[in-house]
Image: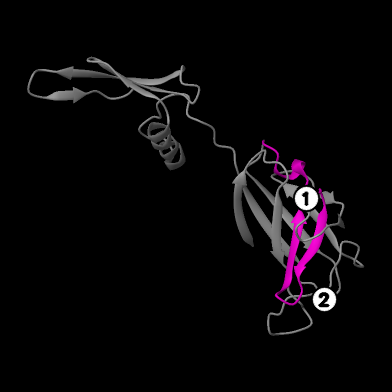
């Protein structure tokens, strides 16, 4: 199953899928599908939830997002490549993944696309030493992006708003060595 990572709670998400032709053995893409092709159906399943139908609708390759919009991108240049506009509810916050399926059309190999939903937010405190890799990377990012102040005795990192303190470290200098303590 193909996988893609996106931000949870995103709106107007469009995915591109490659629908293969089951009537041939060379891996060719199936061309000619439209939103109302006989048997064609799409759905999504969020973690530990029932499947939800995506009502397919007409779309153009470069059109504005429209929930359920389905269109073949380019039958001659990219045979089998289709655009599908997902409903916002499919990628709403609250779960860490959703599986999108497109199937049912004559000669179409079923497609399953798993979207990993990234629900990561800015750290609100200094991560523990045994924090996850993702939490540690987010903290490093915070350090490279956000406001940092330093006085003769203290260094402080702030949240994105520039006023909320995330952590403080003590600074000392004995005239020979400057020492920065651990952020807490």
Specify the quadrant that holds the C terminus.
Answer: top left
Residue placed furthest toward the bottom: 25
Q: Mark 1 Cα within 10 Å, few/some/many (few <14, many 20+)?
A: few
Q: Quadrant of residue 9?
A: top right
Using the rendered image of the protein, determine whether residue 184 is visible from the camera's viewpoint: no
Percent x, y for residue 74? Answer: 75, 70
Residue at 87%, 61% in the rendered image: 35
Secondary structure beneath disc 1? loop
Residue at 75%, 49% in the rendered image: 45
Which residue is the site of mark 2? 107
Stretch of the chain drawn in magenta: 66-93
Specify the quadrant that holds the N terminus.
Answer: bottom right
Percent x, y for residue 159? Answer: 46, 24
Residue at 10%, 17% in the rendered image: 174
User: Height in image: 139 above or below 162?
Assistant: below
Which residue is the site of mark 1? 64
Q: Quadrant of residue 144?
A: top left
Q: Earlier in the sequence, mark 1 or mark 2?
A: 1
């Amino acid at each position: 199953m193909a996988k893609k990572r996106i931000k949870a709670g995103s709106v107007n998400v469009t995915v591109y899928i490659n629908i293969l032709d089951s009537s041939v053995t060379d891996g060719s893409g199936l061309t000619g599908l439209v939103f109302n092709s006989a048997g064609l159906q799409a759905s999504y399943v969020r973690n530990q939830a029932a499947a939800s139908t995506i009502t397919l609708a007409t779309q153009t390759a470069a059109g504005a997002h429209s929930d359920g919009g389905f269109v073949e991108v380019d039958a001659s240049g990219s045979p089998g490549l289709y655009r599908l506009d997902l409903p916002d509810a499919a990628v709403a916050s609250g779960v860490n993944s959703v599986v999108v399926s497109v199937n049912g059309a004559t000669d179409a190999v079923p497609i399953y696309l798993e979207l990993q939903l990234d629900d990561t937010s800015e750290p609100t405190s200094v991560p523990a030493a045994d924090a996850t890799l993702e939490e540690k990377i987010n903290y490093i990012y915070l350090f490279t992006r956000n406001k940092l102040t330093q006085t003769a005795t203290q260094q402080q990192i702030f949240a994105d708003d520039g006023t909320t303190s995330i952590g403080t470290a003590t600074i000392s200098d004995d005239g020979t060595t400057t020492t920065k303590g651990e952020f807490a």
